[in-house]
Image (cartoon, rainbow, N blue to C red):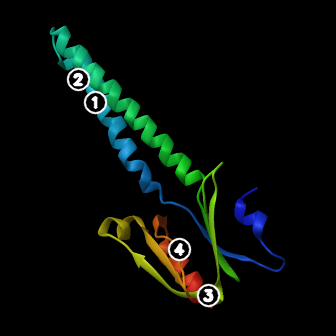
Amino acid sequence: MSYVAEVLQPDEKVLVTSTIHWAIYLPGIVLTAAGFVGFLYGYGGAGADSAMRDIVWALSLLLLAAGFLSLFRAWFRRWTTEIAVTNRRVIYKRGFIRRYTVEMHMDKVESIDVDQTVLGRLLDYGDVIVRGTGTGFEPLHMIEAPIKLRNAVTAK
């Protein structure tokens, strides 16, 4: 059961849910692809120089390990992050064992800032900052569909 489902109050309805955008996988994909290219080069293109082939394979192995680690971290971060807008509040949760949550009632929300790069506009992700009276959320980085999230909060 998700955190958001656990903390819903009676008569509270979820309007929008979101999470981190899939673009967080891109660094891991690039590292993994570079590792595979290195293995292919070491296997066929390094020629008879076995020392060079060993160096290329070792670097490829390091790139593959870094790529798989990056992919796992991105998956885990995306899996353990929940963002929801209900008819009463905005809920943000991250973490698995060490959980961090922030909830802000709708009447305390002053504004929502959305910051999107050109790539973010093309792929529909961006950074969201929820500002409240006296306090606010930390910036929520690489959130998918940030405009939809903002519209759900501002359409009181």
The residues bearing labels 3 and 2 have C-alpha atoms spaced at a distance of: 58 Å
Q: Secondary structure at mark 4?
A: loop
Closer to the chain start, of discs 3 and 4, is 3
Kindly report the distance in space between the C-alpha atoms of the residues bearing marks 4 and 2.
47 Å
Front position among marks 1 and 4: 4
> Which secondary structure lies at badge 3?
helix
- Of the residues tagged 1 and 3, which is closer to the observer? 3
Query: Could you tell me which secondary element the residue under label 1 belongs to?
Result: helix
Q: Quote the CA–CA distance across marks 1 and 3.
A: 52 Å
- Label annotation for residue 137: 4
Residue contact between numbered discs 2 and 1, judged by CB atoms under 8 Å:
yes
Q: Amino acid at mark 1?
A: Val
Q: Is residue 82 above or below residue 55?
A: below
Dot 2: element: helix
Asked which quadrant contains residue 46, the reply is: top left
Three-letter residue code for mark 2? Tyr
Q: CA distance from mark 3 to mark 4?
A: 12 Å
Residue type for callout 3:
Lys
Q: What residue is disc 1 on? A: 37
Q: Quadrant of the N terminus?
A: bottom right
The x, y position of residue 93, in whole percent, is 62, 63
Instruction: Give the mark nearest the N terminus, 1 or 4.
Output: 1
**C-alpha separation, residue under disc 1 versus residue under disc 4:** 42 Å
Which residue is labeled 3 in the image? 108
Q: Which residue is mark 2?
A: 41
Q: Disc 2 and disc 1: Cα gap in Å?
A: 6 Å
In this view, the mark in front (3 or 2) = 3
